[in-house]
Amino acid sequence: MKTREAGEGTSVVYVNGYLNSLLGEEVERVVHDLLEAGRPRVVLNFEGTRLINSIGISFIIGIVERMAERNGTLAFCSLNRINQDLFRMTGVSRYVRAFDSEEEAIAFFAQAV
Amino acid sequence: MRLLWSQGAEASFRPGEFFGRKEELSSLLRVCLEGKSGIGASVLIYGPPNVGKSSLLLKLKSEIKSLPQSTAPPCPFPFYYSFSNILSHPLALSQHFLQEYLWQLLVFLGESPPAAFDLDSLCDTLAARGHMECREYLSAHRRYSEKGDGLSALANAFSFPFATGGELLYPIFLFDDFQYTIKLQNIPEGAIFSILRPYIKAGHFPMIVSGSSPGHVTSSLKREGLYGSFQLLEVGGLSPDASVKAWGPLFERRKIRIPESLAVRAAARLGHIPIYQRMLAEEISFRNVRIEDEVEFENQFALSVTEGKLNRYWREFFENAIPDRVNRARAIKFLKRVIYDRFPIDTFEGAFSLMGTSPEEGSEILSALEFKGLLKSDFEHIEFVRDPVLADFLFWAFERGVLGKNTSQVAASIVQAKIAHGLQEESRGGQEASAEMAKEMMRRWDCRDVPALLFDFGKFHEKYSDKGLLEILIGLEEDPRRVRLPKISSVSKGYRTLRGGSRFDFDLVAYGFHDGDFSEENLVIWAVDVNTEKKLAQSAVEHFENRCRLLSLDKGLKPGQLRKWIFFEGAWDAAVVGLADRYGIHLTHRTQMRLFLNLFGMQELEKVPEERRPPEGRPGDKPLEFELVLPMKADTEVVAARVAEEVAAYASLDKDTVDRIKMAIIEACINAFEHSEAETGKVRLRYVLSPERIELFVQDEGKGFRAPAEGDESKRNRGWGLKLISELVDEVHIETGEHGTTVRMVKNLHPASDDGSITTNSEG
């Protein structure tokens, strides 16, 4: 899975493909590793996400919980309409800020530091 | 003689038919004019093939030439040079370049072009105008040529323009098709930029470099440390306004009339790309068709992509880009997934694995595609063009070439074929009922062995014509000859391909896989006709055989991949039975059919089961129905979503609705996979499309579904499926019992106040 560092303590994770249990697990692992490595701010970039299913969403909820436990901050970016709706329907969007673009998400983190 | 001289793009360019691109033109013009003050930049123009890069350069050239002469010298001299028609030998290129430059310069200075294309006389004419003494250059060039020193000859030729202008003019280079320079023999990539480097850096000589392969060009620029000196300009389709205007002269000249609103839609359909617009206008005129509504336009477009001009255009493109057949097929299959299916891929490794090739072979294909402008690469990243016409062509090419490679494509193609003509299906009474029955039976096959005699009427009759049913049953059980039936993935009624209508019309077509193995080698297609005439006629058998042969040809089926089967009810004669036998057609009479049904635990032909009737059938519009059987395997729900997309496309639903339907069906499938524990390992899907709504049925034969108990912590964060479904569609109904669960989801196609509701009905 592709990730990149975007400033101090901030990382972008690119969720490309079909967010099912397989990919969900991988995202969870990557975010976990980032937290372990002392990088508490994570942007999940959904630009390349074709589909998300409910199992994928359950992994995202797991990630939200873990971030909260570890005082990390999570943001989403580049969600298309249906994926935005899915996060709204499941209530995930109440806990995570979503930005239109990766730049906006990174800028938000940069301000927050 | 003007050796190697060809006007190419320049001759075919019609300034009067150039529309749009105002912003691009004005910024390019500014760059060009700033050369005068020494701050001229250089621009790299890139974009897919034939999108209009050359036209843009030529339009720029004519704009520069038509600038008012009032400004003080030096004045800009636009020199257009295309590398596409050069030979790959550097000496040939340098010679051609010199000739072309001198020629265009003289024309620019108002000289009438000499009749003979002779470097020396061109040079003399230039000297007579007081511009420069160029004989020295030419003799040096001749010396290098004689020595065969290609690199020096190139350096000589490409430095020449910078010495010609003096105080009076400065050349502006409009270099077209620059990607061809990487094909020069024995010349390192980027050599031309090495030669031009000092002039580019000087800022007095603006250079507009255009090419379809920006990856190669940018890497050369980076090597030469020139990347920062170039602005990048990507050229795509025209703006919607401009492309609608572009129809004007195209239609006018050919006396084509189409409604204004359709012109807008048609331009968008073609990605606002002028060359497609021209080709389609030519095609409409050539075929002399009237286009008055969207359906007629779509038909014409489909015709063009499958067998007309748009098809030829892309077919020749691929033949030319990748001459090797095997690699071409690979490239088409690969591109089809990336461009048509929008498979996200942006790394080389990903591309190689999707192609199923080694990096060496894969690189060869990718570099051919890059050279032709279908992808751009930047070291690690690759990006593919998004061209709607190319996407449709690829779908067609894939269907033709490698049908059956995997189930999702097969499913999608069946639906496509079906929706194209599905509405024309006619009810044919008894025949319809028989086909319906056979369809249900074929679905139950699933790799079973059945007596071969049930397929062979001749031998069956010979052996059992005077026997009673019980005797036949016992006889069949002991019969050693068996046919192993494939696992059927999909059966459709009234199959027709997109082209030719009744030529491919069968009562049933089934796709299945031997041994339950979903691979191309094991794909088998069954074409079935139900004959309810009083007597089975020889002509009916001949007609069936002919259609089968066409289908085989059309789909490129290997011998044995197409199974041919006729059911009949009436009388027969030995000659007809013999004929079917010769053609290898399975022949099954009503008596055999009864035995078949018995084998699969089904009822007699006369009774049509209730559940097979379309749900809530209403008078007037007959709902369209599609069916799909999926194995319960990880990720097969994506196939269901893909088919839903195709069905929704037929109803022209908006993207949001389509996405919601896709997500709902994915969730319902996942639920079935997770909860049903069905022994059959299959989920059956039905899509019913009517003008008012789309209904989706997901049925499993599992042990029934129970809503999870509140507070069940074993699957924390899970259990979103049903909630999501109810949010995504307008109605959800769940029928569940010990024989399985059916989830029925309804999405109204016209806005309604009805909010998502779930009803559950347990049988026991």
Image (cartoon, rainbow, N blue to C red):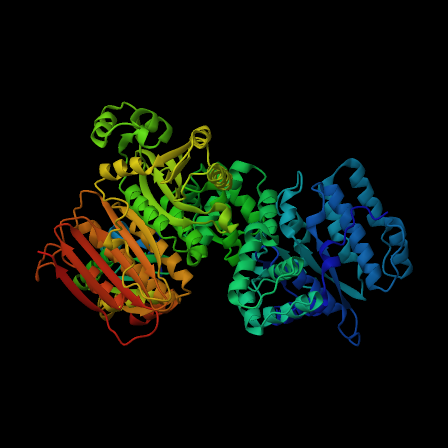
In the displayed structure, B280 sits above or below B608; it is: below
Asked whether residue A33 is in view, the answer is no
User: Residue at position x 55%, y 37% from top?
Assistant: B325
Pinpoint residue B579: horizontal percent, then vertical percent: 46, 30
Q: Position of residue B471 (x, y in %)?
A: 22, 27
Q: Quadrant of the C terminus of chain B?
A: bottom left
B237 on left or right of B487: right
Q: Quadrant of residue A76?
A: bottom left
x, y percent for residue B69: 80, 74
**Rendered image quadrant of residue B747:** bottom left
Q: Which residue is at the front of the view, B268 or B514?
A: B514
- As drawn, is B53 to the left or to the right of B612? right
**Looking at this view, is B493 or B224 the one in front?**
B493
Is B304 left or right of A81, judged from the image as shown? right
Where in the figure is residue B381, as x and y percent of width and height?
46, 51
When the figure is inspected, residue B70 is found, relative to residue B396, above or below; the finding is: below
* B716 and B101: which is toward the camera: B716
- Can the viewer see residue B21 in this picture? yes
> Total label count?
0
Q: Is residue B142 above or below residue B14?
A: above
Q: Report the front residue among A111 and B331.
A: B331
